[in-house]
Image: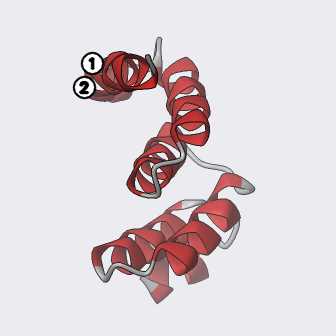
Amino acid sequence: FARLAEVDPDDFQYDLMRGWRALDRGDLSLAEHWRELAAGKTGTMKHLVYLKLGELHERRRDLAAAIAAYERALAMARGTPAAEAHVEYLEAALRRLSLRRR
């Protein structure tokens, strides 16, 4: 991971990966910290930052924040050929959360 930061310190991928590792360990606060850092950086496939933030908020049961993150990820992913696989996932997540809010 450190090599990613050396190659392009402004690219979001290093921080996103650190966030994934923290989330896998169950450290939601640290995962959110790394994802917030990633959100402020550049790079392709950046919708993944918001997709993962949505998952983090969903685990915290903050449905409003999860929906907002998923909506932002969906807006970024639409029209990006490499992100098409995530569009269906995001649409399904938003449908699922809308049902839970009722």
Q: Residue at x 31, y 23 (%)?
A: 96
Q: How many marks?
A: 2
Q: Residue at x 75, y 56 (%)?
A: 40
Label 2 sits on a secondary structure element that is: helix
Q: Residue at x 48, y 88 (%)?
A: 2
| Kind of residue indicated by mark 1 | Glu
Q: Which mark is residue 85?
A: 2
Please identify the quadrant where the N terminus is shown. Answer: bottom left
Direction from residue 55 to residue 6 in the image, left or right: right
Tell me the mark number nearer the camera, choosing from 1 and 2: 1
- Between 73 and 63, the residue placed more toward the observer is 63
Give the class, few, some or many, for how many residues have Cα within 10 Å of label 2's Cα (few <14, many ≥20): few
- Depicted 90 relative to depicted 54: above or below: above
Which residue in the protein does label 1 denote? 88
Label 1 sits on a secondary structure element that is: helix
- The reply to whether residue 8 is in sight is no
Q: CA distance from mark 1 to mark 2?
A: 6 Å
Please identify the quadrant where the C terminus is shown. Answer: top left
Q: Position of residue 70 (x, y in %)?
A: 50, 31
Q: Residue at x 68, y 50 (%)?
A: 42
Direction from residue 90 to residue 32 in the image, left or right: right
Residue farthest to the bottom?
2
To which quarter of the image does residue 8 belong?
A: bottom right
To which quarter of the image does residue 34 belong?
A: bottom right
- Between 97 and 20, the residue placed more toward the observer is 97
Give the class, few, some or many, for how many residues have Cα within 10 Å of label 1's Cα (few <14, many ≥20): few
Direction from residue 23 to residue 75 in the image, left or right: right
